[in-house]
Amino acid sequence: MNRFTVLTLGALMLGIPALASLAFAQSTTQASPALAKANFYVENMTCALCPVTVKAAMSGVKGVRSVNIDFPARTAHVVFNPNLTNMAAIAHASEQAGYPAKAGS
């Protein structure tokens, strides 16, 4: 458990609700940065294994949180931290795996 959770639980056990809310407020102010979303059209996906390879390539980029592949539509929906990566880096990773990706809608 993290420090703020322990403080909150301890304050609640001692019957100090104001202290508990203060500890909880401190822990929530350290929120993660806003995540960005991007859709890519991915070329060369022709077999059942292709989406696995594309997902692995894009997921391997530092800052990528999730990759969802739509094989019939040949698209990838990516959620990422824009402080750690960008759409060009994600597309480049896919291209390096043999599947050129272009940002789309």
Image: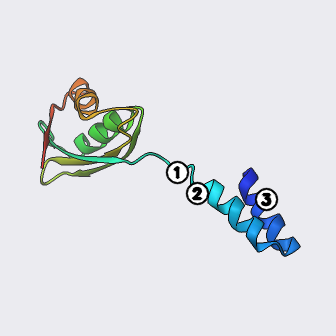
| Helix, strand or loop under label 1 | loop
Q: Is 44 located above or below residue 74 in the figure?
A: above
- Circle 2 packing at 10 Å, graded few (<14), some (14-19), many (20+), is few
Q: Residue at x 72, y 55 (%)?
A: 4
Q: Read off the residue under disc 1.
A: 31
Q: Is residue 24 left or right of residue 29?
A: right
Which residue reaches farthest top? 96
| Residue 45 x/y as whole percent | 15, 41
Residues at marks 3 and 1, CA–CA distance in whole angstroms: 18 Å
Badge 1 amino acid: Ala
Task: Please give the residue where the numbered disc 2 appears in the rendered image.
Answer: 28
Q: Residue at x 29, y 37 (%)?
A: 53
Q: Earlier in the sequence, mark 2 or mark 3?
A: 3
Contact flag, marks 3 and 1 (Cβ < 8 Å): no
Residue in view at x 24 percent, y 26 percent: 92
Q: Is residue 45 above or below residue 105?
A: above
**Residue 22 appears at what percent x and percent y?**
70, 62
Residue ID for mark 3: 7
Counting residues from the start of the chain, the first of labels 3 and 1 encountered is: 3
In the rendered image, which quarter is residue 85 located in? top left
Residue 86 placement: quadrant:
top left
Crowd class of label 1 (few under 14; some 14 to 19; many from 20; radius 10 Å): few
Instruction: Indicate the amino acid at tag 2.
Output: Thr
**Toward which corner of the image does residue 56 lie, by quadrant?**
top left
The amino acid pointed to by label 3 is Leu
Position above or below: 86 against 27: above
Can residue 34 be seen here? The reply is yes
